[in-house]
Image (tube, helix red, strand yellow):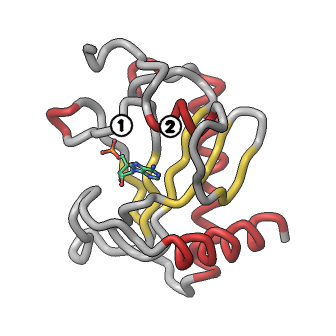
Amino acid sequence: MSQNTYDDNNIFAKMLNGDIPYHKVYEDDKTLAFMDIMPQAKGHVLVIPKQKAVDLAGLEPEYAAAVLMTAKKVMAAQRQVFAREGVIQMQLNGSEAGQTVFHYHIHLIPSSIHELGRHAAVQADNVELADIAQQLAKKIIE
Ligand code: AMP
């Protein structure tokens, strides 16, 4: 399938449908935030819109606003939980750029561009991911 066409069976679509488990950090009517399963640093979170957009080109304005507002909440929580200012906001468009899941998403990675780990390379421990998700979620609702 072309990456220009939205695939209803992509992994994030399956999460939104409740078909596969994930470590939720935050959810509202237009967005979902969850732990990246192969983090590039501890606390790596993904924010996705509840809209079928492959990448930035297909993202509707109301969902663009919503994902950024959720990203702000998540980043504020990451800064508190990890007691650090540095958070990388990253977003890949197209396989040529390295995009591997074709449902638009923002990466929020508590790290420095000079220290960033490899992309989608090493699976994290599920217990640790669940614990971090819980800590971040708690800071968002406080
Ligand atoms: P990208 O390459 O920008 O499309 O990023 C996709 C991200 O999704 C990578 O950082 C992967 O580690 C992450 N990822 C892939 N499968 C899962 C999954 N089941 N749960 C959480 N994150 C995932």
Q: Which mark is residue 101?
A: 1
Q: Residue flagged by tag 2: what amino acid is it? A: Phe
Residue at 66% in and 46% down: 69
Label 2 beta carbon within 8 A of ligand 1: yes
**Front one among 76 and 125:** 125
Residue at 20% in and 42% down: 98
Q: Marks 1 and 2: CB-CB under 8 Å?
A: yes
Residue 42's x, y, as percent? 43, 76
Residue 26's x, y, as percent? 70, 54
The answer to which quarter of the image holds residue 10 is top left
> Which quadrant, please, contains the C terminus?
bottom right
Residue at 25% in and 70% down: 117
The answer to which quarter of the image holds residue 24 is bottom right
Residue 127's x, y, as percent? 56, 76
First along the sequence among labels 1 and 2: 2
**Front one among 95 and 115:** 95
User: Which residue is denoted by mark 2 in the rendering?
Assistant: 12
| Residue most extreme to the left | 96
The answer to which quarter of the image holds residue 28 is top right
